[in-house]
Amino acid sequence: GQQLNQSPQSMFIQEGEDVSMNCTSSSIFNTWLWYKQDPGEGPVLLIALYKAGELTSNGRLTAQFGTTRKDSFLNISASIPSDVGIYFCAAAYNTDKLIFGTGTRLQVFP
Amino acid sequence: KAGVTQTPRYLIKTRGQQVTLSCSPISGHRSVSWYQQTPGQGLQFLFEYFSETQRNKGNFPGRFSGRQFSNSRSEMNVSTLELGDSALYLCASSSGDSFLQNTEAFFGQGTRLTVV
């Protein structure tokens, strides 16, 4: 079945550093979404992408929809302690189900 | 505007029992999807309901079922609970007919089910 390969699995960085994570697939999609999940809570939508090549920012977060429609990346600039959490990519095609990546666990040290 | 509401937040059941979880989507949203999240398997898709009809289904046994009411509220039921069913169950609501229509999916806080 369809799978999203998300990397890295975990990151340990210092406050102020930039972060980059990505998701790839062998299938094409027409929607990519990025979520952040805090412990014991549901995922919160960060950025939504709907067109190949689209680059969208939300504050210090920037995400891009890959031109092949098979990948997406998320960048976080100047990380702060509250960026700690698990980041998930998700993708869908038309009315197909939304499938998720395995998550990137981000730890930020002061 | 209220977000996605899931009840209860926490639940403890014993093996062999059955359980019903509830999800109220964002007002105006017609699609509700359910996910099981465990540390080992991540977010696994259970099923999606749109306008009271199951539109997509994941690879879970028949013990997992769901339904959607005319007001878009959804319930999922798990019968004959097993220890491995312990997980965070999340529901997500979205507004559009398909992801072509710039649809975003918003999650509830989840129901933490523990089977003992």
Image (tube, coloured by chain):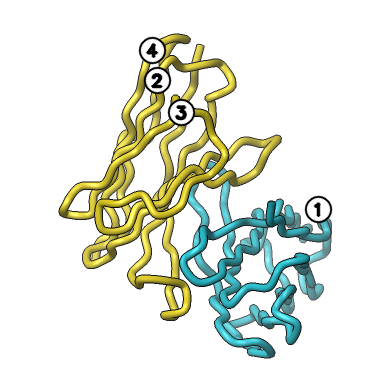
Which dot, 1 or 2, sits closer to the camera?
2
Left or right, A67 with reference to B37: right
* Number of numbered markers: 4
Q: Which residue is mark 1?
A: A9
Chain of residue at mark 4: B
Q: Residue at x 44, y 25 (%)?
A: B63
Dot 2 or dot 4: first in sequence order is: 4
Q: Amino acid at mark 3?
A: Gly
Q: Residues within 10 Å of mark 4 (few under 14, many from 20)?
A: few
Which dot, 3 or 2, sits closer to the camera?
3
Q: Residues within 10 Å of mark 2 (few under 14, many from 20)?
A: some
Which dot, 2 or 4, sits closer to the camera?
2
Q: Are marks 4 and 3 in contact (CB under 8 Å)?
A: no
The chain letter corresponding to cyan is: A
The CA distance from mark 4 to mark 3 is 15 Å
For residue A73, what is the image quadrant? bottom right
Q: Amino acid at mark 2?
A: Ser
What mark, if any, has residue B62 been given in the picture? 3
Chain of residue at mark 1: A
Q: Amino acid at mark 1?
A: Gln
Check if mark 1 and mark 2 are on a common chain.
Answer: no
Chain of residue at mark 2: B
The CA distance from mark 2 to mark 4 is 6 Å
Q: Which residue is mark 2?
A: B79
Judging depth in this view, the residue of A30 and A102 nearest the camera is A30
Which dot, 3 or 1, sits closer to the camera?
3
Left or right, A75 with reference to B87: right
Judging depth in this view, the residue of A100 and A78 nearest the camera is A100
